[in-house]
Image (tube, rainbow, N blue to C red):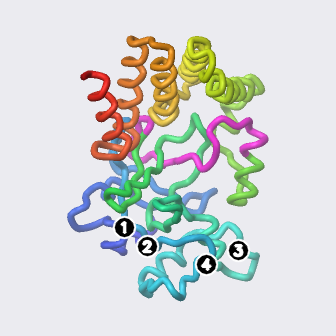
Amino acid sequence: MIREPHECCDECGITGDNKTNALVEVRTCNDKGVGVFALKDVAVGGEILREKPLAMYDNGVDFENLGISQRKRKLIGSLHDAFAISGGGKSYGGITKTNGLPANDGKQGLFCLACRLNHACNGAQNARYIWRGDLGKMMARAIRPIKRGEEILVNYIDPYLCREERQKRLWDGFRFKCACDECTTKWSKSRDEKLEEIRQSIEDYIPVAQFEPKRALGLVEKALETLEMEGLNTPHDLGTIHYHAFQIADKAFDVDKRRFHLKKAHECWLQTEGGGSRLDLMGKDIIAYFEK
C-alpha cells in the first residue's frame, strides 16, 4: 500500500474530521500502477471520498504562478503522467492532461485520491465523480454495491460507445488499452449493437419531443428498458434519462408519467450527488412546484 498520498492530511482529508476518506486506501496494482480500494462495503449512493483540490487551474496552467506549496507540488508530482517520454521524466503538462478533473467555472482540479481512481467502461465501473461546488470538494459516490477490498473504478469517457471507439479514445486521452470486463469477458458484437441502440434512442427522442412528445416519450422509455435489460441501470445512467422523460411527459400532458419520472430522476440524483447538491435542490423545487 502506498502511504504518501495519505500523508497530505488537510489536502485530501484522510485524517481529522473527515472520516469519509478513511473508507479507502491506495494500493499498488500489477497492471495499473496504483489504484484506490474500499476498506468497507459501500451501498449504492454511498459516499466513498471527498477532498479539496491540490490545485485549481484553467487551460495553459502555469504552476509557478499558482502559489502552490512545496508539499502540494510534491503530491502533484506523484500523480501519473501518461504522456511522459521514456527516460525523460514527468512534466506538469503531462500530469494535468492525464489527471485534470472538471470542477466549477470551467476550471479543472488535481486531487490526491480522486485522480488515482482507475477507469472501467460503463457496465464495469462502480463509482462516479461529482464536483460539489457548494462544498468546494470533489466526491466519489457508489453507483453499484462495492465490497470491501474491491477497487473503486470510474468511467473516463462517453458511456455508450462501442469497444473499438472506447479503446481509441482511452488511448488518445490516457495512453492505455482498457482490459475491464466490458472490453474482455462481457464484450460481444451484440453488446456493441445494444450500446449503439441506446445512444441512437437518446439522439432520436430529443428532436422528436419538440413536435411529437407522445412518440418521444415512447422512445425515451424504450431507452430506459434497454438500460435495464443490459444491466446499465445505475443511478448515473438513469437519472438524466428519467429527467428527459419527465420533461417530455410534461409536454405531452401526461401527468402520471410526469410525476413518476420526476420522482425517479430525483431519487437518482440523491444517490449520485447526495443531499444538498444542486440537482437535489432543483429536484425538490420542481416537485414542490407541480404539487401546488
Residue drawn 44% across and 67% down? 112
Three-letter amino acid code at the position of disc 3: Ala
Q: Which residue is mark 2?
A: 54
Of mark 4 and mark 2, the one earlier in the sequence is 2
Between label 4 and label 3, give the one nearer the viewer: 4
Left/right of residue 179 with respect to residue 220 in the rendered view: right
Mark number displayed over residue 12: 1
Element type where label 4 sits in the image:
helix
Q: Which residue is mark 3?
A: 84
Report, in whole angstroms, how far the alpha carbon at label 3 lies from the one at label 2.
Answer: 21 Å
Query: x and y percent of residue 57 in the render?
Result: 52, 72
Between label 1 and label 2, give the one nearer the viewer: 2
Three-letter amino acid code at the position of disc 4: Tyr
In reply to whether residue 64 is colored magenta, the answer given is: no
Element type where label 2 sits in the image:
loop
Three-letter amino acid code at the position of disc 2: Leu
* Other residues around mark 1 within 10 Å, as few (<14) / some (14–19) / many (≥20): many
Residue drawn 73% across and 82% down? 88
Element type where label 3 sits in the image:
loop
Q: Which residues are magenta?
A: 143-166
Report, in whole angstroms, how far the alpha carbon at label 4 lies from the one at label 2.
Answer: 13 Å
Of mark 3 and mark 2, the one earlier in the sequence is 2
Q: Which residue is mark 4?
A: 92
Task: For the residues labelled 1 and 4, say whether their Cβ atoms are less than 8 Å apart.
Answer: no
Query: x and y percent of residue 262 in the render?
Result: 39, 25
Query: x and y percent of residue 209 in the render?
Result: 60, 22
Report, in whole angstroms, how far the alpha carbon at label 3 lies from the one at label 1.
Answer: 25 Å
Residue drawn 73% across and 29% down? 192
Element type where label 1 sits in the image:
loop
